[in-house]
Amino acid sequence: MPARLSIRRSLLSRIVRRLILSLYRAKGWHFETGTERLPLRCVIVGAPHTSNWDFVFFLGATDALGVRARFMGKRSLFHWPLRRFMFDMGGIPVDRSKSGNYVEDVAAAFALNSDLALVV
């Protein structure tokens, strides 16, 4: 897990993000928010994971909430040509081929970052 999770998005990633958010809105989807803002450090639970459309919902919901959320994804998604895009979208690579203590990794990421919103 990276020590510091702040990354400046590439131009291509910003364009793709805007296109995905446009698709989210064009489909008529919206996210109802409460009156209170989320804390800077939090865990957001999104369930169930049903399809790859969940990524579109993820971006739409976090945009509506006003947070730059992070998510865990399998390490194989973080190879070229998707590597930079996955990091820009908030991805944290997870190696699922070996057993490990991901709870400690996540706790370490929260300890190093004062503004981590992790979507699980």
Image (tube, rainbow, N blue to C red):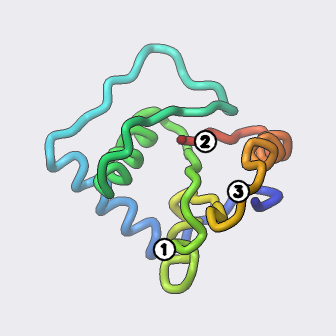
Q: Which residue is mark 2?
A: 118
Location of the C terminus (image quadrant): top right
Q: Residues within 10 Å of mark 3 (few under 14, many from 20)?
A: some
Counting from the top left corner in percent of width and height, residue 70 is at 58, 49
In this view of the protein, can residue 84 be seen by the observer?
A: no
* Pair 2/3: label in front: 2
Q: Report crowding for label 1: few under 14, some 14 to 19, many 20 or more residues within 10 A (C-alpha).
A: few
Give the CA separation, mark 3 to mark 1.
16 Å
Name the residue tied to disc 3: 6
Name the residue beneath numbered marker 1: 11
Please say whether residue 60 is visible from this viewpoint: yes
In the image: residue 15, left or right of residue 40? left
Residue 15, position in %: x, y? Answer: 38, 68
Q: Of marks 2 and 1, which one's residue comes earlier in the chain?
A: 1
Image quadrant holding the N terminus, namely: bottom right
- The x, y position of residue 11, in whole percent, is 48, 74
The kind of secondary structure element at disc 1 is helix
Instruction: Please name whichever residue, 118 or 19, is drawn nearer the observer in this view of the structure.
Output: 118
At label 2, the amino acid type is Leu
As drawn, 72 above or below 35 = below
Secondary structure beneath disc 2? strand
User: As shown in the figure, which amino acid type bears the numbered disc 1?
Assistant: Leu
Say the numbered circle drawn on residue 42.
none
- Residue 65 position (above or below residue 22): above
Q: Residue at x 70, y 64 (%)?
A: 98
Q: Earlier in the sequence, mark 3 or mark 1?
A: 3
The CA span between labels 2 and 3 is 13 Å
Q: Pick whichever, 117 or 37, lies toward us.
A: 117
Question: Mark 3: which secondary structure?
Answer: loop
| N-term-proximal mark, 2 vs 3 | 3
Query: In front: mark 2 or mark 1?
Result: 2
